[in-house]
Amino acid sequence: MAKRIDVSGLHVYYGDFKAVEDVSMTIEPRAVTAFIGSSGCGKSTFLRALNRMHEVAPNARVEGKVMLDDQDIYAPDVDPVAVRREIGMVFQRPNPFPTMSIYDNVIAGAKLNNQRLGRTEADDIVERSLHGANLWEEVKDRLSKPGAGLSGGQQQRLCIARAIAVEPAVLLMDEPCSALDPISTLAIEDLIAKLKENYTICIVTHNMQQAARVSDQTAFFNLAGTGKPGRLIEMDETNKIFTKPDKKETENYITGRFG
Amino acid sequence: MTTTTKKSSTGASGDGPAPMQRTLLTGSLPRYFAPALLAGVAIVTGGLLFALGTFSIPLFAVFTVVTYTVLVTLASARIESGRKAKDRLVTAVVYTCFGLAMVPLISLLWTVARMGVVRLDGYFLTVSMNGVTPTMDAGGVYHAIVGTIAITGFAALVSIPIGLMTAIYLVEYGRGRLKNAITFFVDVMTGIPSIVAGLFVVALWMVFFGPGTTNGAAGAVALSVLMIPVVVRSCEEMIRLVPNELREASYALGVPKWLTVVKVVLPTAIAGITTGIMLAIARVIGETAPLILTAGSSAVAINWNLFDGQMMSLPVFIYSQVRMGDAINYERAWAAALTLILIVMLLFFVARLVSRFFAPKFGR
């Protein structure tokens, strides 16, 4: 189920502006890879390029190769919709569909795609996904209530349940805890640790302790200078990045001596 | 503020009255001051006008409001601060403007209701003017209601899909010059005088069906020319309000763009879209000029067929009755006006129900 992602020589452009330059990395299956770096260094852009979400912005394009196991996701005939079914995403701000109940939010992937689900099949998916997102106990008695009525942390877990309900191979998380309180953050981090048994997980975070806690691999991104594209500075075992990184830039960033 | 400080400083120097205790309430007029002053002014001006024998409601209102505004500002400037005086002045002016804006509205509704109920009954609503001579004490507006519903309904049927899809194109798909051109022409269309829309359809019908062809469909097309830009504009605004995050959430689940629009964007915006469409319908349901030109103004019989023969509608019925000029005609015109207002109110009521039913829910 979990798949490996191989990125080689990836450049991301918004029109004429080059946002990310020449990134190559391997993202291991059944592991958590954290992307850290200062704001605007292109880590979110890079993350979105992994499931072609950057194409939502007009004029965005990439050069380079992204392989999902043995398939090139940027091959000419590949439909971005098919890519996104394989590579799910959780966003910075919880975004449950306001018109749908908790139940419908979880099976939104199937419902919005006009897939016919049997009642028991749908019930199974909902229960399994909510268990997977550690939310079942809290919402099992009010599945028909609107998803927007949950607390922020619950909403974010609902979004994770929604993302894993379509059984993707990879889960991308773009600062999933930055809008949450410490308790909810802890709940999400526990969940990430559990999810990595079955999924390939990439997480963008500004919180270095979080990266240190949840990830197996850490990639550090930085800008070469104002107006210059972001680059991958260093990627290694999380332990190594946070104890003795190879590059001076990385060390400056993680110890707070920036610039 | 300044006044207070001066007072307490003179108090402290010993040659004034006993030192004043400064509290948070120092230098502010009591809460009941403004209403009390207004009541006082009203009584005094009312009494004076009666004494002079020149009492009339407009005169009374003008004198009361002007006197009150001047007095409350002066009192506030003297006891409170300059800032508070300005606040009271502007408050008085804003309330006055609000009152002025309400006068025509209330007066209109009241007049229509008072004059309309004279003739508005089950009989009036269920018979046509077929075989009724203008001054006969008989006849009703059923044929005009039928015409209004048929013409406006057909206009809505044409305009809502075109308008809504244009709005979807502008927000979700449109880029570059085509989008700018459409936006520009929609703006231009918003400003088309309704009589011009009527003339346009007259010319169009002349080309297709020969001169002098009047029927309900022509009226409906003229109304859609007026309605489409309003629908586009309001739907565009509403669709634009749907947060991008919801679209992204849907894309991230592997949902294609068209399904995202149909199943996420439109349901989220449905409340606003319904209201916008209702406003557009309300805008055209009272149109008279284009309908006189296109659907005719002399139909007296019930006609459900949009494509054959003239069709009466409520606004045109009002117009033609008023032109006849007898007392009974005025009664019919007022009753028809009341009917039209009631139909519009009914539409808004339905729209409210629809929006409440479909709107995003946030309960727990």
Image (tube, coloured by chain):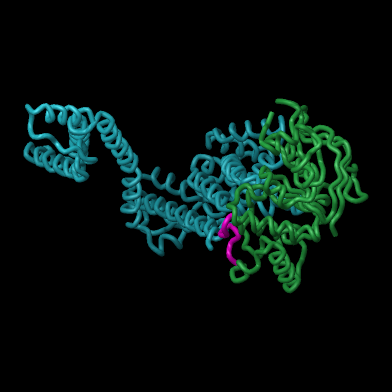
Which segment is the magenta one? A144-152
Q: How many labels, in total? A: 0
Q: Position of residue B142 (x, y in %)?
A: 47, 58
Q: Position of residue A230 (x, y in %)?
A: 76, 32
* Quadrant of res B21: top left
B323 left or right of A120 in image: left
Q: Is residue B293 visible?
A: yes
B199 left or right of B179 in image: left
Q: Residue furthest bottom?
A: A120
Does the magenta-highlighted stretch encompass residue A1? no
* Quadrant of res A116: bottom right
Residue pictured at 79% horizontal, 34% vertical: A247
What chain is the green one? A
Q: Position of residue B329 (x, y in %)?
A: 37, 50
- Please name the color used to draw chain B: cyan
Q: Could you say which is closer to the camera, residue A133 or residue B212?
A: A133
Q: Residue furthest front?
A: A244
Position of residue B33 relative to residue B357, above or below, is: above
Quadrant of image for the N terminus of chain B: top left
Q: Residue furthest right?
A: A70
Q: Could you say which is closer to the camera, residue A38 or residue B342?
A: A38
Q: Could you say which is closer to the camera, residue A120 or residue B59?
A: A120
Position of residue A205 relative to residue B87, above or below, is: below
Residue pictured at 30% horizontal, 39% vertical: B95
B300 left or right of A11 in image: left
Q: Is residue B162 visible?
A: no
Residue pictured at 33% horizontal, 40% vertical: B98
Does the magenta-highlighted stretch encompass residue A149? yes
Q: Position of residue B104 (x, y in %)?
A: 33, 42
Position of residue B256 relative to residue B126, above or below, is: above
* Quadrant of res B46: top left
